[in-house]
Image (cartoon, grey):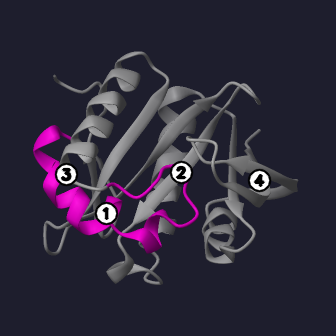
Amino acid sequence: MKSKLPVLETERLIMRPLTVQDAEEIFTNWTGDPEVAKFMRWDVHQNSGETRTWIEAEQLAIEEGLVYDWGVVLKETGELVGSGGLCFTEEYELFELGYNIMRKYWGMGLATEAARCIVKYSVQNLGIKKLYCCHAKDNPASGRVMEKAGFVYWRDGSYLSRDGKKEFQCREYLFECE
């Protein structure tokens, strides 16, 4: 399946559509890591087959225009180190920004660089003027990424994991451009 997503580029990153051929690398690098999954809506994947199923679902959602999701590749090494994108949230009728970076690269500004790229693409290419995002209160580093990407604190809230088994107290943010 050919993706409708363009390849995006930043100073250190290439942001490209994910493919099912990436499943093993994604599982090894972040979806199989409990620390990366700790505050996410999704649960840690148990094997690369689960990751493949997730990629296939993402590809269908991309085709429907409900999701824009890129793999985050380090230009220097070609390593697939994370993913990031937008997912339409019916509750707020806004696209929500989300991102994951493998633990080895935490604290290096890669999530911020990817988030800024996604926000820029959404404004310039999709005409989106308002975005939503949130982070678990126990994960303040993600809040710093959001602020550096232009988001402003809106209010406190909560979110559930997709299986409904975990609830996280969170801080919610909005991005608005004139």
Residues under labels 3 and 4: Cα distance? 32 Å
Q: Is there a contact, CB below 8 Å, between mark 2 and mark 4?
A: no
Residues under labels 4 and 1: Cα distance? 28 Å
Horizontally, residue 16 falls left or right of residue 35, namely: left
User: Label 4 belongs to which residue?
Assistant: 173
- Crowdedness near tag 1: few (<14), some (14–19) or many (≥20) residues, C-alpha within 10 Å: many
Closer to viewer: mark 2 or mark 1: 1
Q: Residue furthest right?
A: 155
Image mark for residue 98: 2
Q: Residue at x 22, y 41 (%)?
A: 52
User: Label 3 belongs to which residue?
Assistant: 48
In terms of secondary structure, where does tag 4 sit?
strand
Can the viewer see residue 77 in this picture? yes
Closer to viewer: mark 3 or mark 4: 3
Horizontally, residue 165 falls left or right of residue 171, namely: left
Closer to viewer: mark 3 or mark 2: 3
Closer to viewer: mark 4 or mark 1: 1
In terms of secondary structure, where does tag 1 sit?
loop
Badge 3 amino acid: Ser
Q: Residue furthest front?
A: 165
Horizontally, residue 166 falls left or right of residue 29, namely: right
Look at the image and give the residue range highlighted in magenta.
17-45
Q: Residue at x 79, y 51 (%)?
A: 158
User: Label 1 belongs to which residue?
Assistant: 32
Q: Residue at x 19, y 44 (%)?
A: 49
Q: Is there a contact, CB below 8 Å, between mark 3 and mark 2?
A: no
Residues under labels 3 and 2: Cα distance? 21 Å
In the foreground, 77 or 117: 77
- Residue 36 drawn at (x, y percent): 44, 68
Badge 2 amino acid: Gly
Can the viewer see residue 17 in this picture? no
Q: Is residue 108 above or below residue 97?
A: below
